Amino acid sequence: MKRFALTLEFDGTPFFGLQRQAHGPSVQQTVEEAVKRVTGELVTLHAAGRTDAGVHALAMCAHVDVAKEIEPFRLMEAVNYHLRPAPIAVLTCEAKPDHWHARFSCTGRAYEYRIANRRAPLTLDRNRAWQVTQPIDARAMNRAAQSLVGRHDFTTFRSVHCQARDPVKTLDSLAVRRDGDIVLIEAAARSFLHHQVRSMVGCLALVGMGRWSEDQVGEALAAKSRQVLGLNAPSKGLYFVRALYPDE
């Protein structure tokens, strides 16, 4: 068996999430079926992160184990052919040693959230950004975000369906900046709780809209209660952007 690392780009709009689902299409199922058409083998796709329905990826790292003798470039080209017309692409493919694992070897993950701050309806960014029509203050959001950086109990920003054993996580960075009509929220950590990024973005957006003070974000964190969460941002604005590994 040879292990191949795949870097995946996908539009999450038509999928019920990355992981295989019994009630609808998933990124995992679609990629596994494409690999089977190439190799004739049943494979399991292991990914660095788990994304919900509607969440996108610019560079999701994953791996599959294949018995067939095939070069990485040929596997990438063939899988991309069989992925059509699904909005998934394999950007890179490389052989890895058996001990390397897309999920368990990963030492850092980064997400980006996009808010389209304009009144005109979205065309190119439809289903790829959260539209907020009223003006928002990105600088205020960035100041408020700093209270979340560091090691904390993120119970307030954790989904009630989260399966993590411990709500304590270390958030390495959380930054908010404006690029024209787009407000970008960038988050990096070793790992995240279920809905953590979307929940943090929702509360920061309340600050940007003037509905929360900057101090309320830190107060919500300290409360350690999902009941005080102000807003959970929609999935369509969230992107998995990077996975880090010890050899990088």
Image (cartoon, rainbow, N blue to C red):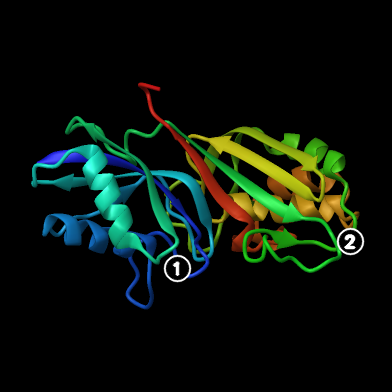
Position above or below: 191 against 212: above
Point out residue 221 in the picture as x, y percentages from the top left corner: 69, 46
Q: Secondary structure at mark 2?
A: loop
Position above or below: 131 against 137: below
Query: Disc 2 marks which amino acid?
Result: Gln
Query: Disc 1 marks which amino acid?
Result: Phe
Front one among 91 and 99: 91
Mark 2 or mark 1: whose residue is earlier in sequence: 1
Residue 118 is at least partly visible in this image: yes
Q: Which residue is mark 2?
A: 134
Point out residue 192 in the picture as x, y percentages from the top left corner: 51, 45
Point out residue 17 in the picture as x, y percentages from the top left corner: 44, 63
Front one among 27 and 110: 27
**Residue at the (28%, 61%) spot, across then down:** 82
Query: Which picture quadrant has residue 104?
Result: top left
Q: CA distance from mark 2 to mark 1?
A: 30 Å
**Residue at the (86%, 41%) spot, across then down:** 140
Q: Secondary structure at mark 1?
A: loop
Residue 194 is at least partly visible in this image: no
**Residue at the (32%, 33%) spot, across then down:** 105
- Looking at the image, which residue sits at the far bottom? 23
Q: Which residue is mark 1?
A: 15
